[in-house]
């Protein structure tokens, strides 16, 4: 059977644009705040669930999508509160919220999945490629602007050095809560848009999303660099799109869909460990070069003494 690569490329680009929003959310916690937030797996589904329930109830798709962003932000806010006010470990806070959201999402939907076929959605299949690039660019630019405001700079400083920024009178608890809330709001927004794109919301659709988000961030930074915030957010968005192309090609050449989570995990593992091996190889090369230079100098001195 001949593969229609044009259709594959279009589908990958469309999904990649939706996932780029989620990747920007993951970038805030993973890179800016240095906060290992596993709430993502739950808040992604929360966004999809809220938008699906509201759309099927006759609410405007735009309002339903904005409500999904708000629902994700509330989930992130609760994770931030667990960590900052409840003094619970950051990783454990995310895990607890992710587990809680599984039940909450089922409560929101009332069943395991909701079909959106026949319902009005925010974007038609014909308009996605014309509108979504501008949506992603707008969100990227808004995030760039925010991260250069006074609050955004405090958020970045919190991730770099909490003790230092506290000495300037900044309440790091508030910046962490804000950052995690904003991150999960973007993740939920992505979930809402993908549910509308796919035509359904499912209680399990968020499983493994944190790994996909990390893969997008790491691939983007590895290939395009992260010299500045403006460049880093662009790299992350491009990484999400590129990741979807890699997945699509893998599926077309025979990789089973059930193995995709494993493949994603392996990509993240390689991307995280490769820089360490590169540094080790460079250090060993420098040591070998110095040893060779010292040996050469030592041989020259011995020759001169004779």
Image (tube, rainbow, N blue to C red):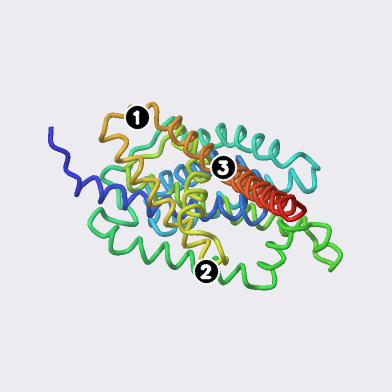
Q: Residue at x 77, y 58 (%)?
A: 161
Judge depth for marks 2 and 1 and give the one in front.
1
Mark 3 sits on what residue?
272
- Dot 2: element: helix
The answer to whether residue 111 is seen in the rendering is: no
Residue at 32%, 43% (x, y): give it: 198
Estimate the x, y position of residue 90 in percent, counting from the top left.
Answer: 71, 42
Residue at image coords 16%, 43%? 4
Report the front residue among 144 and 230: 230
Most extreme residue toward the right, as rendered?
A: 167
Q: Which residue is mark 2?
A: 142
Q: Is tag 3's residue or tag 1's residue first in the polypeptide sequence?
A: 1
Q: Position of residue 257 (x, y in %)?
A: 34, 29
Residue hosting label 1: 257
Residue 259 against residue 162 in the figure, above or below:
above
Query: In which image quadrant can residue 62 be found?
Result: bottom left
Give percent across and percent down for residue 84: 77, 48
Report whether 35 appears left or right of 173: left
Relative side of 91 to 55, left or right? right
Residue sitting nearer the eye, 278 or 196: 278
Rendering coords of residue 71 (x, y %):
55, 50
Q: Along the polypeptide, which appears first: circle 3 or circle 2?
A: 2
Q: In the image, which is nearer the foreground, mark 3 or mark 1?
A: 3
Q: In the rendered view, tell whether residue 98 sits above or below residue 58.
A: above
Numbered badge on residue 78: none
Decide: few, some or many residues near mark 2? Use Cα within 10 Å; few <14, some 14-19, many ≥20. Answer: few
Local SS, label 3: helix
């Amino acid at each position: 059977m001949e593969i229609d690569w044009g259709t594959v490329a279009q589908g990958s680009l469309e999904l990649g644009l939706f996932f780029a929003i989620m990747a920007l959310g993951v970038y805030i916690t993973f890179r800016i705040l240095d906060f290992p937030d596993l709430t993502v797996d739950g808040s992604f589904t929360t966004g999809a669930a809220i938008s699906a329930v509201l759309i099927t109830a006759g609410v405007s798709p735009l309002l339903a999508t904005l409500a999904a962003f708000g629902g994700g932000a509330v989930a992130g806010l609760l994770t931030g509160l667990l960590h900052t006010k409840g003094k619970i470990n950051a990783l454990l806070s995310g895990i607890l919220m992710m587990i809680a959201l599984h039940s909450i999402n089922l409560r929101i939907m009332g069943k395991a999945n909701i079909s959106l076929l026949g319902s009005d959605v925010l974007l038609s299949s014909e308009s996605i490629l014309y509108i979504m690039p501008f949506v992603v660019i707008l969100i990227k630019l808004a995030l760039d602007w925010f991260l250069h405001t006074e609050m955004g700079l405090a958020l970045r400083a919190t991730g770099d050095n909490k003790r230092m920024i506290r000495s300037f009178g900044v309440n790091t608890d508030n910046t962490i809560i804000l950052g995690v809330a904003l991150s999960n709001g973007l993740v939920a927004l992505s979930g809402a848009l993908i549910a509308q794109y796919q035509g359904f919301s499912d209680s399990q659709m968020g499983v493994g999303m944190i790994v996909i988000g990390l893969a997008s961030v790491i691939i983007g930074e590895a290939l395009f660099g992260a010299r500045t915030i403006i460049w880093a957010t662009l790299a992350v968005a491009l990484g999400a799109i590129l990741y979807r192309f890699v997945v699509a090609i893998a599926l077309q050449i025979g990789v089973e869909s059930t193995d995709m989570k494993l493949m994603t995990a392996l990509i993240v593992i390689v991307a995280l460990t490769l820089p360490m091996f590169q540094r080790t190889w460079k250090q060993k090369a420098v040591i070998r070069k110095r040893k060779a230079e010292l040996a050469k100098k030592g041989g020259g001195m011995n020759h001169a003494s004779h």
